[in-house]
Image (spheres, helix red, strand yellow):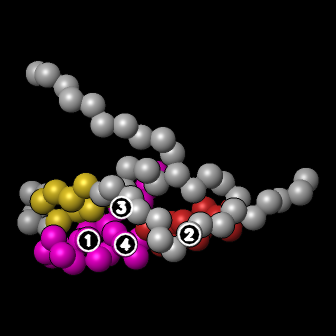
Amino acid sequence: MMQRRIRYDEGMKFLVSIHRDEDGAYIAECPAIPGCISQGRTEAEAEANISDAIRECLAARAELGIPLTTTTREVEVSV
C-alpha cells in the first residue's frame, strides 16, 4: 500500500474554545482536530499552548497520513 504524505500550511487558522474549569485553569480545545486540547493558568497562556498543540497535532496527523481535520459546525440549541 502506497502512503501519501499530507502537508499543512503554516498559515492555517482554527477556531478554538477556551473555558475556565472548576480549579481555575483555562482549558483550550480545537474542535476541528479531535483530541487537540491544552490548558494554561491564564487565557493568554491557554491560547499560546493550544497554538503549539495544534501545530503538533497537525504534524502527527500528517505523518500518520490521516485527515488533518474533521468537519465541525456550530448550532444554537434552546433549552
**Which SS class for mark 3?**
strand
For this orientation, the residue located farthest to the front is 11
Whether the residues at callouts 2 and 1 have beta carbons within 8 Å, the answer is no
Q: Kindly report the distance in space between the C-alpha atoms of the residues bearing marks 2 and 1.
A: 19 Å
Residue under pointer 4: 51
Residue 70: give x, y in percent of width and height: 51, 45
Q: Residue flagged by tag 3: what amino acid is it?
A: Ile
Q: Residue flagged by tag 4: what amino acid is it?
A: Ser
Q: Residue at x 35, y 61 (%)?
A: 37
Q: Which residue is mark 2?
A: 9
Q: Position of residue 67 (x, y in %)?
A: 62, 52
Who's the residue at 40% across and 76% down the image? Answer: 52
Q: Amino acid at mark 2?
A: Asp
Report the mark closest to the observer, 3 or 4. 4
Measure the C-alpha gap from mark 3 to mark 2: 20 Å
**Residue that label 3 marks:** 37
Residues rendered magenta in the picture? 34-53
Q: Please, what is the three-letter code of the amino acid marked with disc 1?
A: Glu
Disc 2 or 1, which lies upstream in sequence? Answer: 2
Which of 74/50 is in front? 74
- Are dots 4 and 2 in contact, CB under 8 Å? no
Residue that numbered label 1 is attached to:
47
Inter-mark Cα distance, 4 to 2: 14 Å
User: Between disc 3 and disc 1, whose residue precedes?
Assistant: 3
Q: SS at mark 2? A: loop
Of circles 2 and 1, the one toward us is 2
Q: Is residue 8 above or below residue 42?
A: above
Which residue is most to the top?
79
Disc 3 or 4, which lies upstream in sequence?
3
Asked if disc 4 and disc 1 are in contact, CB closer than 8 Å, the reply is yes
- Residue 52 against residue 21 in the figure, above or below: below
**How many discs appear?**
4
